[in-house]
Image (spheres, helix red, strand yellow):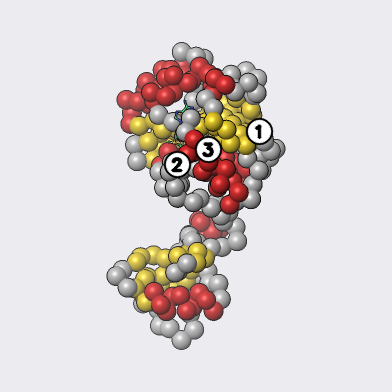
Amino acid sequence: MKRFVYTLSEDKLGELLAERPLPLEILERKDDSVVIGSYEPLEGIEPCRVEEVPEDWKSWRESFGPVDVEDFVIMPPWKVPVFINPGMAFGTGLHPTTRLCVKLIKEYLEEGDSVLDVGTGSGILSIVAKKLGASRVLGIDVSEDAVRSCKENAGLNEVQIECRLARPSEIKDRFDLLVANLELPIFKEELDNMRHIFRRCAIFSGIYRREELEEFLDMLGSRGLSPDRILEEDDWFAIGIRNERD
Ligand SMILES: C[S@@+](CC[C@H](N)C(=O)[O-])C[C@H]1O[C@@H](n2cnc3c(N)ncnc32)[C@H](O)[C@@H]1O
């Protein structure tokens, strides 16, 4: 598959995108110019180079990141938008711990699952779960700002999520999937309270560096839990668990 590489000014790119959506990716941004790769030649513009790229559908789809132009975000129709109003609560999607959770939710969540999001923050993981087809989603947090933010963001995304000020020990229901992006000291307090809430899977994130990972795995092991998946990004770890005993 051919990729046509162009260097354009931001203004020119804006003009092109305003005319019609183009299958392109941003390769590099410089001061006032942008290097783009297009999968079709752009009429009337000479490419800096034409290169051969592997025709892999998945990576081809993934290569179309969102394009920011002025107040617009242009993205292909297979991307799922999540609106987060940046505020007091943690969870914009920039932090590795959140991103790892999103990956594992995508892997574990089954259509119609009930989900408990412990430490919901902005509500980002609850919204992702809901958009992936969860039925009931409950987001809990110990911060009033977080609960407010979670409710606001659920509204922005037009999804139904319960957001409540609570700790895991106060949750009496059981959920198919539990996701908790916390920190090791909080896991030390809360792991026993979370242990019996999830029926099928749990995702624990917020574990920093190998030393914490080893300590956390010991904590799991002493409770009869073993990791099914361990993901890492920038020294942060997320652990996925499948409950075999239910
Ligand atoms: C790292 S943020 C995660 C936010 C969001 N879920 C994400 O993945 O981006 C952790 C959140 O857990 C909350 N939290 C801390 N201790 C908690 C506890 N014992 N029970 C519930 N939430 C807690 C904090 O207030 C904070 O909003």
Residue 237 lies left or right of residue 159; in this view the side is left
| Mark 3 within 8 Å of ligand 1, using the beta carbon | no
| Whole-percent x, y for residue 114 in the image | 66, 33
Q: In the rendered image, which residue does mark 2 sit on?
A: 89
Q: Tell me if residue 104 can be seen.
A: no
Name the residue at the left extreme.
31
Are dots 2 and 1 in contact, CB under 8 Å?
A: no
Crowding at dot 1, Cα within 10 Å, few <14 / some 14-19 / many 20+, comes out as many
- Figure check: 208 above or below 51: above
Return the disc, 3 or 1, that comes first in the chain's sequence: 1
Name the amino acid, label 3.
Val
Name the residue at the top extreme.
222
Secondary element at tag 3:
helix
Crowding at dot 3, Cα within 10 Å, few <14 / some 14-19 / many 20+, comes out as many
Are dots 2 and 3 in contact, CB under 8 Å?
A: no
Return the disc, 2 or 1, that comes first in the chain's sequence: 2
Q: Tell me if residue 82 can be seen.
A: yes
Label 3 to label 1: alpha-carbon separation: 19 Å
**Residue 117 versus residue 110: which sits nearer the camera?**
117
| Mark 2 within 8 Å of ligand 1, using the beta carbon | yes
Name the amino acid, label 1.
Ser
Secondary element at tag 2:
loop
| Whole-percent x, y for residue 77 in the image | 60, 61
How many tags in the picture? Answer: 3
* Of the two numbered discs 2 and 1 in the rendering, the one whose residue sits closer to the viewer: 2
- Figure check: 193 above or below 228: above
Q: In the rendered image, which residue does mark 1 sit on?
A: 114
Residue 147, numbered label: 3
Name the amino acid, label 2.
Ala
